[in-house]
Image (tube, rainbow, N blue to C red):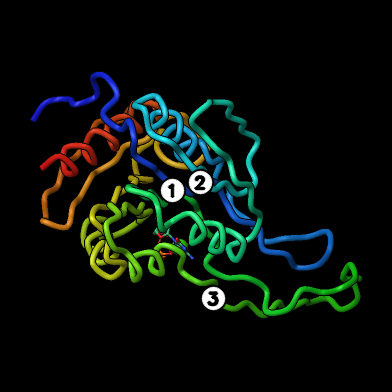
């Protein structure tokens, strides 16, 4: 199978991408977050727009910015906000890619005032956030839905499990084990798995190149 990234193969298509971390408020000045930079999602947005797609980039807090005629950035902070934004834009998209590092848990309550230090120990009660990708999978119609999986053990098995459980068309397994892959790195090493159990492993590459590989795999399957 060759490379299909000639011309504008995504012209007329709408692509939604979630990117970056989410921040879950503890009180007015504190939050629970993670080290996601958003770079993989932003590279996917750029690559999709360069292939002619209209892109909605639903982005958690990042230091990145994008200006492209075909890209609309929707900024969100928390997982609940990302959930709402993603659902608002899901209906009329052809491809949806969930590259965000959504916080799995949020504080059960958000303190109205800054929490003062008193006791030696402080316990925060956390509750599970909604799984945005799962909820998109459950209402999926014509969309080609792609997730990411970050695993530190049983990588392929866990990724396959997520692919199935979330009703995805494909999943991108991110290998954190390799040096120079994953969070806060300019490079990534991925394995692309689809719902027909096709598996394709890629070399360590820049995230811009990885974005093109991912879109190429999606386009191959859309055209099939
Ligand atoms: N995801 C999501 N909403 C969440 C959690 C995850 O949309 N609340 C998406 C991520 O964007 C990613 C995929 O689900 O595309 C898998 O995320 P990951 O953290 O690897 O898996 P989880 O399902 O959260 O399971 P766990 O963290 O326990 O491995
Ligand atoms: Ca998770």
Tag of residue 128 = 3
- Split into 4 quadrants, where in the image is the N terminus? top left
Q: Are marks 2 and 1 in contact (CB under 8 Å)?
A: yes
User: The C terminus lies in which quarter of the figure?
Assistant: top left
Mark 1 Cα shell of 10 Å, populated few (<14), some (14-19), many (≥20): many
**Secondary element at tag 3:** strand
Instruction: Give the side of residue 112 with respect to residue 74, left or right.
Output: right
**Is 32 on the left or on the right of 46, as rendered?**
right
Real-space Cα separation, disc 2 to disc 1, in angstroms: 5 Å
Question: Is label 1 in contact with label 3 (beta carbons under 8 Å)?
Answer: no
Which one is in front, 177 or 208?
208
Which quadrant of the frame does ligand 1 lie within?
Answer: bottom left
Residue designated by label 1:
99
Is residue 181 positioned above or below 122 on the image?
A: above
Dot 2 alpha-carbon crowd within 10 angstroms: few under 14, some 14 to 19, many 20 or more: many
68 vs 127: above or below: above
Residue 19, label in figure: 2
Confirm or reject: label 3 Cβ below 8 Å from ligand 1: yes
Q: Is label 2 or label 3 in front?
A: 2
Secondary structure beneath label 1: loop
Q: Nearer the viewer, residue 219 or 131?
A: 219
């Amino acid at each position: 199978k060759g490379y299909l990234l000639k011309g504008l193969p995504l012209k007329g298509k709408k692509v939604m991408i979630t990117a970056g971390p989410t921040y879950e408020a503890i009180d007015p000045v504190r939050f629970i977050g993670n080290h996601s930079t958003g770079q993989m999602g932003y590279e996917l947005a750029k690559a999709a727009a360069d292939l002619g797609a209209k892109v909605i980039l639903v982005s958690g807090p990042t230091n990145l910015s994008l200006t492209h005629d075909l890209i609309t950035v929707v900024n969100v902070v928390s997982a609940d906000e990302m959930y709402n934004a993603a659902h608002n834009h899901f209906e009329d998209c052809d491809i949806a890619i969930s590259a965000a590092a959504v916080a799995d848990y949020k504080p059960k309550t958000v303190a109205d005032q800054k929490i003062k230090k008193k006791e030696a120990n402080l316990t925060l009660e956390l509750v599970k956030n909604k799984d945005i990708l799962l909820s998109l999978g459950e209402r999926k119609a014509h969309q080609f839905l792609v997730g990411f999986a970050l695993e530190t053990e049983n990588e392929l098995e866990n990724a396959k499990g997520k692919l199935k459980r979330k009703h995805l068309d494909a999943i991108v397994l991110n290998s954190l084990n390799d040096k120079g892959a994953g969070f806060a790195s300019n490079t990534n090493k991925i394995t692309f798995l689809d719902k027909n159990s096709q598996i394709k492993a890629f070399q360590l590459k820049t995230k811009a190149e990885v974005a093109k590989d991912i879109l190429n795999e999606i386009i191959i399957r859309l055209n099939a």
